[in-house]
Amino acid sequence: MTTSALPQPQLRASADAASDTRQQRPLAAAPQQRRWHWSWKQVWFQLHWFIGITAGTVLVIIGLSGATLAFKEELLDIMNPGVRHVAVETRAPLTPAQLSSIAAAEHGQRVASITVYAQAGAAPRLFFMPKNGQRRGESIYVHPYTGATQPALAGAGFFEWTESLHRWLLLPRDPGRQVAGALALCLLGLALSGLYLRWPRRPLDWRTWLTVDPALKGRSFLWNLHAVAGTWCLLVYVALTLTGIYWSYDVVRDNIDAWAGKPPRVAQAPGKKGAPKEQSPAVDIGLAWSSFQQHAPGWTLATVRLPTRSGEAVQFTWLASDVPHERARSRMSILPADGTVTENDPYSQQALGARLVNIIYPLHMGTYFGLPGRIIVTVASLGLPLFAITGWMLYLGRGKAKRAVQAQRAMLGAGATGKKNTGLVTLVAYASQSGQAERLALESARALQQAGVAVDVQSLDRFDPAQLRQYERALIVASTFGEGEAPDGTRRFARLLQQTSGTPLAGLQVGVLALGDRHYSAFCGFGHALAQQLQTLGATPLFPLIEVDKHDANALADWSQALARCSGSAIDAIGVQEDASYDEWRLLRRVLLNPGSLGGELHEITLTGPAEATWEAGALAEIIGCNADGSEGDAHFAQYAPRSYSLASLPSDGELQLLVRQERHAGIDNQGFGLCSGWLTRFAPPGATIRLRLQANPAFAPALVDVPCIYIGNGSGLAGLRAHLRARRRAGLARNWLLFGERQQAFDSVCGEELQGWLDTGHLARLDRVFSRDGKEGGKREYVQDRLRACADELRDWLAQGAIVYVCGSLQGMAAGIDAVLQEVLGQEGLDALLAAGRYRRDVY
């Protein structure tokens, strides 16, 4: 999933201090652990792609050849009119005995068997005895009324070649069967793993399973088509693969036949020639045929196997008119001398095992379900190229995106490791809360390097104001947090800068790019404060401060032009982010979590989207809101979308979940509901399109190493904390303390069962739930920060063990209160050290 390179909302406390996360000692092993700690879903995802791109091409060949064979008989009749079906005459057709005599005399070969049809005008088929070294003899069609040999079937050779391709890939028969069987297992694995990968929590939602959304575009449409078509074909592929395996492996076939009570097959060495068997003179089968017709009324097809020795019975295999499929054959043995029936084994009276084995071929061909079944099997076989094409497109697109990310990281890394020079080196610094300022700074540094400018990239999180005197020129990208505040990691730098007096920065030229969101009152507040203080200390502005309102391409173009003037060379646009980075997700369901609450409605929103979408705990979803009628929000309204929400689930959960508080506003716009929250919690119907972009949030990344973690939040802030705790649970990390606040226990025990279960099983070492409106003795309200202050001793102990503090929820009140408590417990220097070590991470709004 592509992450935006543009500024994000000011109030979202996310991972700007990505560099802190990478360099802090206690978490140095975290990236490696995350790399190898795969969930089962990730394992199956990798296997699904690997099998698809390796065996997929050959499966396409098998699918196309199978589709060709599905209507082989009809195609042969079209290509050979008048050969297998002749004009119906008034005279009776010749009997098998007559046909056998005519064919033997004309061809000089003894007839082994004859297949005749009750349908008038259908040409019988005769098989001659195999010659030495042959597996089977030649066959011909004969005229049912004259016995004359019909012309050879045009196209028969092509279909024989196609069948050889389908069954053993034109290889020698035995190894070819085994290769085809292995490919059948691959297709079975693809079908079942695909089912597992897209299995939702509500499997009875048929729209999710069976409907393709033509409104989707790009990779989202490819995935939707791939997944939905796979669901439609799933049962067909399972049937085709299981039945195909029966013919591919002798051990499978022999064991199934033995269970069904069928006699063991007699293997014959291929190509082995022996002396011809002695055969008695031809036997008249006229009486046997007459007896068969008397004992098999309503037959539609009969294969007559002639005896090769005197005393042997004539063997009849036949189909009745009411049988369920073409392999539901009855058997009868009749003595040719007097027409005595020595064996009569109707299909309906055969053992259950034998009848089940006889179903294998009709299931494989689809004929068990008649013409509709054959059409379904054909369409499913023709669908294999679709899966191969869409699968390869998704795979190549995923690889392209991965390579682009790797290239970007390599370029950013190269820009960040330039040798420091106290002469003409340009400082490129950033104060980042959500990671956007860092990305823009690194991209800018790279552009300057390409223009021949020596750069030194620094995060203000680890920077002292005194170091600015080492440079003659500085370019600073600064995001704003809260109501005009510095990002969390930059607070120390901002405080030290405010404490500096005089004009120590005289001679320093400074250019500032301020990131913000006009939706908030203190738009770009920290950027303005920073620029003003730098000028107060003697720095000279290179150009007027540039404000960027989220996706303001014009402002970023101004920044690019300013860089070009600084470098003296043309510079491509910095931070351009196309709208295509938003994917289309679907609303599966929403659940009201706090009915009767004094606060606003809190809903669990569940979405489904691209199969390849992945994220880690702490990530954000940026969503384009819509009006009540489904139209996108107007950019001129104060409630303009998009909005960012913390993710409450993990990819291994199979769904993307959010906890969204329904916002209400006075006025008539959008019926008084917040644009995005109203769309998600009230107006969007099930299955509605949700335009969403996943955002990495590295400074709020999970700690998947064995260090204790303290999770603090309130309201919808439980979303981000829940994802963290789920990730820690999957990693087997149990030193977790959750301190969470809401209004009333009776109505606001959000996710109570899940949290209590974690406490009971030991995943949570401690759980503090604070309900402010329930009050304490004396009627005084208790808030999260009050509980944390009361637990100061325990807090010190956890921090002494290296605990990481995560805060998620409202900035005003809760987050500010937690900040004050930490400052009381640790002191200002201790709090600064906690921030600098990346052990105090906030996602607040």
Image (spheres, rainbow, N blue to C red):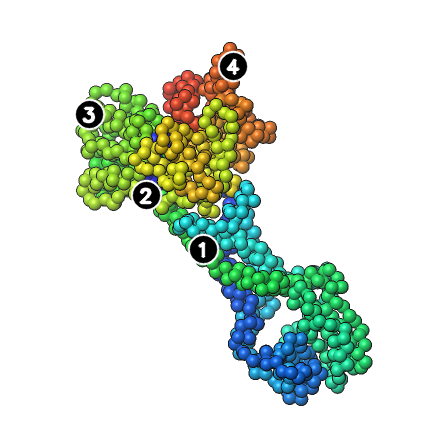
Q: Which of marks 1 and 3 is in front?
A: 1
Q: Disc 2 on helix, strand or loop?
A: loop
Camera-nearest residue between 232 and 117:
117
The CA distance from mark 3 to mark 2 is 36 Å
Q: Is the residue under label 1 in contact with that under label 4 (CB below 8 Å)?
A: no
Quadrant assignment, res 319: bottom right
Q: Which of label 3 and label 2 is nearer to you? A: 2
Identify which amino acid the numbered label 3 is placed on.
Answer: Gly
Residue 38 screen position, x and y as percent: 51, 42
Q: Distance between the residues labelled 1 and 2?
A: 26 Å
Q: What residue type is labelled 2?
A: Gln
Disc 3 vs disc 4: Cβ atoms closer than 8 Å? no
Q: What residue type is labelled 4?
A: Lys
Q: Which of marks 4 and 1 is nearer the N terminus?
A: 1
Q: Are marks 2 and 4 in contact (CB under 8 Å)?
A: no
Residue 530 % position (x, y): 26, 27
Mark in the foreground, 3 or 4: 4
Residue 763 at what x, y percent from top left?
56, 30
Q: Which of marks 2 and 4 is in front?
A: 4
Instruction: Identify the residue under disc 4.
Output: 776
User: What is the number of the mark on residue 577?
Assistant: 2
